[in-house]
């Protein structure tokens, strides 16, 4: 769907998440959410916080799994996705901190593989992700699944693309300080979610959205794999949709 602006689109996505949480609450069940970082979902998180404060939306039955984290990365660092998630969402809602999962950027190299397998297993044991929200990088990455990622990839350590590191340079005070690696859920992990919403705003994303939605399905643009799924929705503002 295409919205006039990102504010309207963000509220629509937040409402979908709130509806899911309430539907699960009504059945006495947990909602398992896959969450994303970056500037794109900030408005969604702000609206969820607003609904928590003003409309009594509770997150007590919510379990979250974040897509990715830089590696190495201390959770307390300003650029960590842990800091991002607490600042934009978790510190302002009533979620049980034990229900929050974010890939661990502090692991030793030899602990990464078992951590990633355990991450997949935790999601699976909860019955899978009910809803995964995604942004998109200008390389066509989802999570940190850069060009070359396999469609059935799982959670793993990856090397960041040069363009991704250039785009992140602003947050790190220069590209040299952007980590070269990250831990990310795989394309396969994302695909198993029962519902996927990819969001994009602004002109800057228009070319990659055109490729993701209309381009040939290929590992060169990992987001094109989403064309193969029956339960993906692209939520765009008019600018991001302007080349479609
Ligand atoms: C980062 C994140 C992605 C995100 C992308 C786009 O690299 N790992 O999950 O979708 O960048 O970021 P933004 O929303 O800031 O444009």
Image (cartoon, helix red, strand yellow):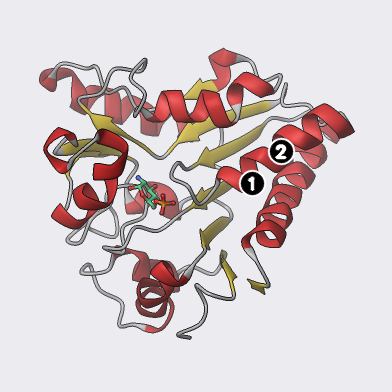
Q: Quadrant of residue 68?
A: top left
In the rendering, at what x and y percent does residue 190 appear? 43, 50
Badge 1 element:
helix
In the rendering, at what x and y percent does residue 195 appear? 58, 55
Q: Residue at x 52, y 78 (%)?
A: 241
> Is 83 drawn above or below residue 187 in the view shown?
above
Res. 128 visible in picture: no
Question: How many labels were placed on the picture?
Answer: 2
Q: Quadrant of residue 72?
A: top left
> Is 126 drawn above or below residue 4 in the view shown?
above
In the rendering, at what x and y percent does residue 35 appear? 51, 40
Res. 44 mark: 1
Instruction: Determine whether label 1 and label 2 are within 8 Å by CB.
Output: yes
Q: Nearer the viewer, residue 47 or 56?
A: 47
Q: CA distance from mark 1 to mark 2?
A: 6 Å
Q: Residue at x 36, y 15 (%)?
A: 76
């Amino acid at each position: 769907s295409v919205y006039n602006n990102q504010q309207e689109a963000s509220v629509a996505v937040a409402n979908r998440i709130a509806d899911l949480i309430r539907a699960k609450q009504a059945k006495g069940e947990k909602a398992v959410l896959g969450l994303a970082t970056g500037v794109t979902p900030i408005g969604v998180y702000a609206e969820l916080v607003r609904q928590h404060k003003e409309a009594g939306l509770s997150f007590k039955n919510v379990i979250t799994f974040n897509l990715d984290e830089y590696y190495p990365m201390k959770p307390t660092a300003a650029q960590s996705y842990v800091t991002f998630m607490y600042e934009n969402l978790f510190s302002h809602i009533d979620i049980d901190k034990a229900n929050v999962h974010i890939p661990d950027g502090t692991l030793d190299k030899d602990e990464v593989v078992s951590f990633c397998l355990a991450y997949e297993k935790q999601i699976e044991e909860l019955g899978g992700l009910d809803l995964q929200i995604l942004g998109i990088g200008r390389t066509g990455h989802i999570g940190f699944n850069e060009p070359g990622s396999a469609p059935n990839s799982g959670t793993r350590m990856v090397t960041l693309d040069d363009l991704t590191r250039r785009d992140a340079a602003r947050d790190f005070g220069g590209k040299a300080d952007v980590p070269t690696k990250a831990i990310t859920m795989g394309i396969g992990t994302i695909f198993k979610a029962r519902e996927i919403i990819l969001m994009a705003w602004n002109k800057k994303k228009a070319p990659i959205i055109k490729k993701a939605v209309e381009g040939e399905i290929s590992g060169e643009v990992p987001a094109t794999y989403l064309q193969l799924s029956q339960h993906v929705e692209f939520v765009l503002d008019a600018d991001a949709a302007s080349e479609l």
